Amino acid sequence: MTTALAGCQVLDSASTTDAFKPSANPVTVDTVTRNDRIVSIAREQHPRILATYGGNYSDPKLERMVAKVVGTLTLDPENPNQTYQITILNSPNINAFALPGGYLYVTRGLLALANDSAELAAVIAHEMAHVTANHGIQRQQKEAEEVLASQVVNDVLGGDPAARVALVRGKLRLAQFSRNQELEADAIGIKAIARAGFDPFAAARFQQSMAAYGTSRSVTGAVDENLDFLASHPTAPQRIELALRHARQFGAPGTGNRDRDSFLAGIDGMLFGDTPDEGYIRGRVFLHPKLGVTFAVPDGFVIDNSAAAVTAAGPGDIAVRFDGVQIDQRVSLSDYVRSGWVAGLDQQTIRQTTINGNEAVTAKARAEGWQFDVTVIRSSGQVYRLLTAAPAASNQLDAIASQVGGSFRTLTPAEREALRPLRIRIVTVQPGQTVATLAAQMQGVDRKLDMFRLINAMGAGATVSAGSKVKIITDR
């Protein structure tokens, strides 16, 4: 699994990334030319960022739109010497962050959530603020202080309760320090977008969209939190109110340019969600066009695709994990199950079977208050693992594991050919259309009405008007 980077990090440490090659087509506004140590470190980190977030996302129309926004922000008379390079990352996670020396990153997932150029400008200006305020260096120093304090507590003071309290207080101080940096970057960013002529209220709007996204994520059970903007961007109502207070210093709502049409034209056709290399989630079904396999989870389960595995969570704390492994064809599936990777394996439960024409082996295991069903399937030379976990007291394990395992099958050539990635499409509202009828046009997503409102930043009572433009998600 690739090393994860928390949202809105300002990174300073160097790493060896010779194994990776940087993107041949980064989205650039200006090339960083200062030949100092900080920029050198950032250049070393750049390939690591690309490897972690699926590389750069190449779409000339989208790149021009983002570059236009960043270019407007860089015409800042208060900071004329800082140059920036921005890369759009090919990740569905909602994230943006900065490296010292002016390297800025924004994911296509974040672009899908934003609704105008001013909101994008607010995010980018926030990240620029981290760079110009040297937050990365400050945080590194603060973290070093807290690490030293932790070592003193652990190595010298041992289990002294007072020392433990001091350690907890140190962690709280670091958390408060990070929060203060975020609020400072908010203030600097809002001032910057206002000076650039953008709507200063865009920052609060996007924070509200992030709050709605966070609520949705808690319902859908999304994973990979370390790759996500909300990992370090708490959207408390107080923070939104502070953003509104900063914006009011520059005028009433409606002040400044939102440039919505330009933004929507830029993201029209942009990939949404997973790539063909990762496979697709369609409701409760996972389909992988390149591997040519699919399986489904029961009603009430929420399925999620991450870099390491496909996971699903359901009622009663039951969970499912699906992944693939490379095994020598000469090794039997039974021997593989016995090879030691299954903790608490009950050897007597190993059974050879066939699942929809594919060779398979099932087994049971128990460990630390949990019971497990292990299903290993060989299909087209590849071995897949379906692991179902349930609390030891649950009586649902067998039924769930049987349903999930029994749904595994290979896709037909026609099914593989018909699978297409989801994309953002911009449509113009026609007379008589409503939020409900527009949401019904969406493909490949659950809870269409909720998702439509989320990506268009519409509250429960919001309506659409003929002639306006909205985002939908479709595979066409």
Image (cartoon, helix red, strand yellow):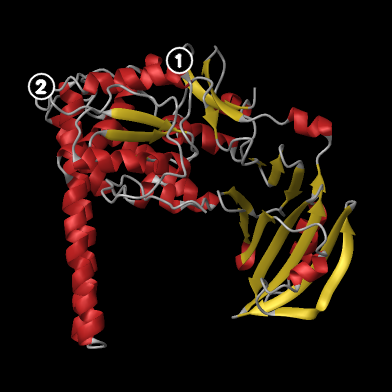
Quarter assignment of residue 376: bottom right
Number of other residues with Cα within 10 Å of mark 1, as a class: few under 14, some 14 to 19, many 20 or more:
few
In the image, which is nearer the foreground, mark 1 or mark 2? 2
Whole-Å distance between the Cαs marked 1 and 2?
35 Å
Dot placed on the residue nearer the N-terminal end, 1 or 2: 2
Q: Is residue 294 above or below residue 471?
A: below
Q: Residue furthest front?
A: 18
Residue at the spot of label 1: 468
Q: Amino acid at mark 2?
A: Pro
> Of helix, strand and loop, which one carries label 2?
loop
Residue at the spot of label 2: 77
Number of other residues with Cα within 10 Å of mark 2, as a class: few under 14, some 14 to 19, many 20 or more:
few
Q: Is residue 287 left or right of residue 3?
A: right
Q: Is residue 139 left or right of residue 65?
A: left
Q: Which mark is residue 237?
A: none
Tell me where residue 34 appears, x and y as whole percent: 19, 31
Q: Is residue 176 above or below residue 459?
A: below
Residue 224 visible in the shown view: yes
**Residue at horizontal 66%, vertical 68%?**
389
Tell me where residue 28 appears, x and y as whole percent: 34, 23
Quarter assignment of residue 279: top right
Q: Is residue 211 left or right of residue 177?
A: right
Tell me where residue 90 appears, x and y as whole percent: 48, 34
